[in-house]
Amino acid sequence: MIEVELKGYANDEIFERVRREFTLVRKEYHEDTYYQHPCRDFSKTDEALRIRLRRFNGHFEAFMTYKGPKLNEESKTREEIEVPLTDPDEHARILEKLGFLEVLTVHKVREKYYVEKGVVITLDEVEDLGKFIEIEALVEEGEEIEGKVKYLKSILERLGVREFERRSYLELILERAGHGEAGRTLRDS
Amino acid sequence: MIEVELKGYANDEIFERVRREFTLVRKEYHEDTYYQHPCRDFSKTDEALRIRLRRFNGHFEAFMTYKGPKLNEESKTREEIEVPLTDPDEHARILEKLGFLEVLTVHKVREKYYVEKGVVITLDEVEDLGKFIEIEALVEEGEEIEGKVKYLKSILERLGVREFERRSYLELILERAGHGEAGRTLRDS
């Protein structure tokens, strides 16, 4: 399964429009810790390894997620492998023993909205970064991606999104902290 | 917690003596897959990363275990971090994406016997290697290890064990397959 995903910069108006127009699935609190590979520069290979602690409706869950390189120029489409963790602290200890380094922890509040079968919109309020909107659909491997991306983009544009963003929150926060000036120039251009 | 562990070569007589003298806790079937680190030679750093599938009494469990370098000349004492896996196949996929290579899968039948509080004897019938006996105790960090090792060794000797082995089943199988001649010479000396 491939996740086709598109992210844009949002504001209060866009958030309110989504809240009025679509049905809230749930509100989640995320604490995402990203790791650097011991001998491969994930910022160059465009991969990511993350442990996510997720809280919603009184539930608490943890996951480990590997994200492969983006497969598409425009969207954030990439392979994802996600597994539930019963003991995230011990998993983190194993990662550290194997030489993986904790890069950063990203805190965010996420609201998920049902758009139509297989399509979900997410409103993210990210600590230190601000408001974002994501739209996401799952496609089978082999299914046509470009058309799906165009369709998802048109939905975001109708909601008022003018600026899109392919970079992850991790990349954006690292850039803000003074790394990766090249990336920032690209976005601003 | 540190695992103090001593392993010796066994035979039918030693197996029968243990079966008569101690109480069977349970019989397990193990399928252990070992991984090589993408940029660190575990055979040199004396570490190991393993996914174990374990079956007993109709239960099925999976674990990921990191083993640190041995801390003691005589025994197999080392740090261990073990976490349960709910989806071992997906965890294995993530490891492969991160560049970890499957080295080998070791199949064995294990019988565990209760010796006394905190001390367990294990009879292992290892595919392609034969019969082994292990004795194991857990000690708190900081507790004295040498005395414990001597005590465990005396139990194995009383049961008829003459030859001890610090190397793992993985190392022994790899050596049999033609790697690590130095190790074999050491053992035979």
Image: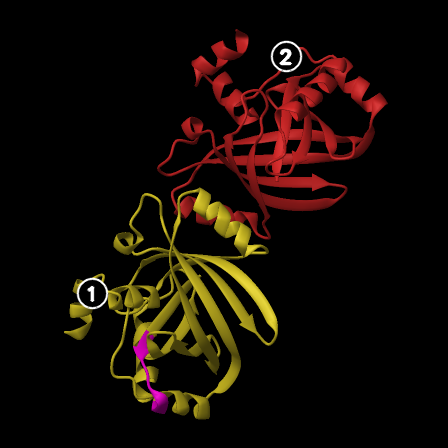
Chain colours: A yellow, B red
Residue A183: image tag:
1
Residue B163: image tag:
2
Total marks placed: 2
Q: Residue B6 appears in which quarter of the rendering?
A: top right
Is A5 one of the magenta-colored residues? no
Say which residue appears at 37% left-offset and 39% top-offset.
B38
Say which residue appears at 56% left-offset and 48% top-offset.
B88
The answer for which chain carries disc 1 is A
Q: Is residue B12 left or right of residue A58?
A: right
Considering only vertical position in the picture, is B106 above or below B153? below
Give the residues drawn in magenta, as a range: A7-13
Count neighbours of disc 1 (C-alpha within 10 A) and say few if under 14, some if 14 to 19, many if 20 or more. few
Query: Measured from the top left, where is residue B179 in percent x and y?
Result: 43, 19
Q: Residue A121 appears in which quarter of the rendering?
A: bottom left
Query: Measured from the top left, where is residue B23 in percent x and y?
Result: 83, 30
The answer for which chain carries disc 2 is B
Q: Nearer the viewer, residue A64 or A21?
A: A64
Taking the view exactly as shown, the residue that stands out farthest to the right is: B20
Considering only vertical position in the picture, is A24 above or below A2? below
Rounded to the nearest whole Å, what is the CA distance between mark 1 and mark 2? 62 Å
